Image (cartoon, helix red, strand yellow):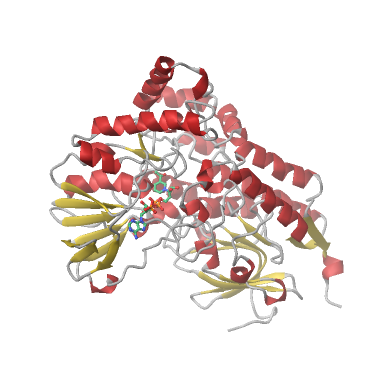
């Protein structure tokens, strides 16, 4: 293995990952800043999470007209989305189109994972090593590894004993899975499970759903996009994109009618009925105070619970499917199509494992409580080691050889989610401490890449060799992130935002709840103040004696 600066090829930037973040970073850094860039991607093609998540029913729950890049007017005008919420194949086709259109693939090394990255202080470069044995030095290291890319199968005893097929929604086989007529189990009822369950029920011989916590599922209201609607948006795309950039969630939502507490029951119900029938996340935006006031929250939660009772034929089954012990929105809201009514099918069974957890897998299937259930296929829809799993899978060592795993042992600490003290010239796209998973992630990605792009341009103009977050500024940002999250219901229940789904993971609320627009303003202020909170060391000063 080579380690000397003379022997290793040196580039301006290494980007890890060729999902939507890595692709856009490549486009801006290579084509606009003229940097010499290498991109390493473990998959065999572009798309990131959309490359892997090929499970039946996979689609995005941000409206497709806004879940797309805004950086190129030509791109947004030429691409036609066909449905309100795009399917995984359509999103992947879009990613491929972007890769072709901007000739991205020629700079991406596929089927290659970054194993380690070590900061060489004497050269102010990152020494990046891959699983194919390559070593590359880079001035800047950009983590574009994604927030929901490290899929997680829970440690269940006996998993190796099962003789049938084990699948995870986030690692679905590329040539599909043959579920026709088979006895299939799905473990997990989060966003992935909610989308997969109705589709699997249509083909499986029998589907058994293992549910630990019921989620609130709002009807997606998916539909083909009317050409007139698309034309309308495209005629004013720039204004709408700008609105997204400065909004709370990075997308266009119908405005709330006001506080849930200021309307009488019939006015509230009329509005909830209307929004429920249209479907989509606008339901969550019906009132201004659903996410901050428990009484207001209960009004919407009760309404959603009533709907479940109406969808499900058997009241006892409906009771099991109904969330009762946390506020609506405290676990990520799911958008579903035919979710609850799927449980009325004769070939679908719900097993509520809240009080009788899954204890082991056997040769034949799953044991929960006293009972063994037999299957041909078990589908884990059990989620991800979110936000930190993929980046901490890489052995990253910063100043003084400190490992990122140690630095974040008590939870991730960043300045603006972009950078962490002690790891110069390393930037995270949609890192912990930024809005990331709480907003339209493409808007988040573009904002981060644009900000890093401007910083690199500034660095080049001023002959700066090293950029790093100051510990005090980082502490202040972490305090601010924590302070904001305290007020949110998202911290009141076990969820993956706090790492609660991974045994041993520190319970720290990771994303920033302050919203896309205000967050963007914070980043802009830091840049306008000459990158306040970052230490920028000129090349001469940092040169070895
Ligand atoms: O994962 P999850 P996901 N025994 O962690 C259950 C995004 N996404 O892949 O709630 C039994 O939400 C677990 O139960 P509990 C989106 O941001 C977006 O569904 O911990 N059950 C839960 O039900 C989303 O939030 C889209 O009690 C076990 C489920 O597995 C994020 O990805 C689509 C268990 C995991 O749910 C993750 O969603 C898909 C066990 N031992 C994903 N272990 C769209 O855009 C775990 N569970 C639409």
Task: Say which of 440 and 291 sits in front.
Answer: 291
x, y percent for residue 480? 68, 47
x, y percent for residue 459? 77, 56
**Left/right of residue 315 with respect to residue 390 in the rendered view:** left
Q: State the count of labels.
A: 0
Q: Residue at x 68, y 51 (%)?
A: 479
**Left/right of residue 479 with respect to residue 151 in the rendered view:** right
Task: Say which of 50 and 44 sits in front.
Answer: 50
Residue 222, visible in the rendered structure: no
> Quadrant of the rendered structure where residue 484 is?
top right
Task: Say which of 43 and 183 sits in front.
Answer: 183
Q: Which quadrant would the C terminus be assigned to in this image?
A: bottom right
> Quadrant of the rendered structure where residue 318 is?
top left
Q: Looking at the picture, does residue 102 appear above or below residue 127?
A: above
x, y percent for residue 168? 33, 59
Q: Which quadrant would the N terminus be assigned to in this image?
A: bottom right
Task: Say which of 174 and 260 sits in front.
Answer: 260
x, y percent for residue 516? 60, 39
**Left/right of residue 374 with respect to residue 213 in the rendered view:** left
Residue 170, visible in the rendered structure: yes
């Amino acid at each position: 293995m080579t380690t000397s600066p003379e022997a290793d090829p040196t580039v301006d930037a290494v980007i890890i990952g060729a999902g939507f973040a890595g692709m856009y970073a490549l486009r801006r850094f290579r084509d606009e800043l003229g940097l010499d860039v290498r991109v390493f991607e473990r998959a065999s093609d572009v798309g990131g999470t959309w490359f892997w998540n090929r499970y039946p029913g996979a689609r995005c729950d941000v409206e497709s007209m806004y879940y797309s890049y805004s950086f190129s007017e030509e791109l947004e005008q030429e691409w036609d989305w066909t449905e309100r919420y795009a399917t995984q194949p359509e999103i992947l086709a879009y990613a491929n189109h972007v890769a072709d259109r901007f000739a991205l693939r020629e700079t991406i090394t596929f089927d290659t994972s970054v194993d380690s990255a070590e900061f060489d202080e004497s050269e102010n470069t990152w020494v990046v090593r891959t699983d194919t044995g390559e070593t590359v030095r880079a001035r800047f290291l950009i983590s574009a590894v994604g927030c929901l890319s490290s899929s997680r199968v829970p440690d269940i005893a006996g998993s190796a004993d099962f003789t049938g097929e084990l699948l995870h929604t986030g690692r679905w086989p590329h040539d599909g899975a043959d579920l026709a007529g088979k006895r299939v189990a799905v473990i997990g009822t989060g966003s992935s499970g909610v989308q997969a369950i109705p589709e699997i029920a249509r083909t499986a011989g029998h589907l058994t759903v293992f549910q630990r916590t019921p989620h609130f599922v709002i009807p997606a209201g998916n539909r083909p996009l009317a050409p007139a609607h698309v034309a309308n948006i495209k005629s004013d795309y720039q204004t709408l994109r700008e609105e997204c950039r400065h909004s709370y969630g990075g997308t266009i939502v119908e405005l709330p009618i006001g506080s849930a507490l200021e309307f009488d029951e019939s006015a509230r119900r009329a509005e909830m009925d209307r929004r429920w029938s249209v479907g989509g996340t606008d339901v969550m935006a019906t009132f201004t105070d659903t996410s901050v006031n428990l009484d207001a929250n209960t009004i919407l939660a009760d309404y959603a619970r009533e709907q479940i009772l109406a969808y499900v034929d058997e009241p006892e089954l409906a009771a099991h499917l109904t969330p009762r012990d946390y506020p609506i929105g405290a676990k990520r809201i799911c958008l579903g199509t035919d979710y609850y009514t799927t449980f009325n099918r004769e070939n679908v069974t719900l097993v509520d494992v809240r009080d009788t957890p899954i204890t082991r897998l056997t040769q034949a299937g799953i044991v929960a409580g006293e009972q063994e259930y037999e299957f041909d296929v078990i589908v884990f829809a059990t989620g991800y080691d979110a936000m930190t799993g993929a980046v901490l899978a890489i052995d990253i060592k910063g100043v003084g050889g400190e490992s990122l795993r140690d630095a974040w042992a008590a939870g991730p600490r960043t300045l603006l989610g972009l950078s962490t003290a002690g790891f110069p010239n390393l930037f995270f796209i949609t890192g912990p401490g930024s809005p990331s998973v709480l907003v339209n992630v493409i808007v988040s990605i573009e904002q981060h890449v644009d900000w890093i792009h401007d910083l690199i341009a500034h660095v080049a103009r001023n002959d700066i060799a090293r950029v790093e977050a100051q510990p005090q500024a980082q502490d202040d940002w972490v305090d601010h992130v924590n302070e904001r999250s305290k007020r949110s219901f998202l911290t009141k229940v076990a969820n993956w935002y706090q790492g609660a789904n991974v045994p041993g993971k520190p319970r720290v609320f990771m994303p920033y709840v302050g919203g896309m627009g205000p967050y963007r303003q914070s980043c802009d202020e830091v840049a306008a103040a000459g990158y306040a909170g970052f230490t920028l060391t000129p090349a001469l000063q940092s040169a070895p004696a």
